Image (cartoon, rainbow, N blue to C red):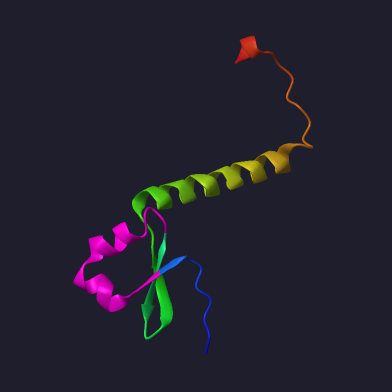
Amino acid sequence: MPYPILSDMAASISELKANPMKVVASGDGRAIAILNRNEPVFYCVPAAAYEALMAALGDVDLADLVKSRVREDPVPGSLGDL
């Protein structure tokens, strides 16, 4: 059965067990699909890429919040009151 692999790079779970840092380094900062019997079981994501992903997701959450509040009535006041 074919499986989508959502990465440009893939490594076997055996390769990961043998030398995890070499596998991470081979991705050159990108995620690597880890395969078990040619089936993707998880993605090895470097810390910097994961942090960027979390920041982007946070931005999406903030954009959703802004969109939900755009139709609200403004609160009267001035900047000096803040």
From the viewer's side, name the closer residue of 33 and 57: 33
Q: Is residue 39 above or below residue 19?
A: below
Give the residue at the far bottom of this rendering. Answer: 1
Q: Is residue 38 above or below residue 23?
A: below
Residue 18 magenta = yes
Answer left or right for 72 relative to 9.
right
| Most common SS among magenta residues | helix
Which of the image's four quarters has the C terminus? top right
The residue positioned 42% from the left and 56% from the top of the image is 30
Give the residue at the far left of this rendering. Answer: 18
**Image coords of residue 73 (percent x, y):** 79, 31
From the viewer's side, name the closer residue of 38 and 48: 38
**Image coords of residue 48 (percent x, y):** 38, 48
Say which quarter of the image contains residue 45: bottom left
**Image coords of residue 11 (percent x, y):** 35, 72
Total count of labels: 0
| Highlighted magenta segment, given as a residue range | 10-30
The residue positioned 30% from the left and 57% from the top of the image is 25
The residue positioned 53% from the left and 76% from the top of the image is 4
Residue 6 magenta = no
From the viewer's side, name the closer residue of 53 and 30: 30
**Image coords of residue 6 (percent x, y):** 51, 68
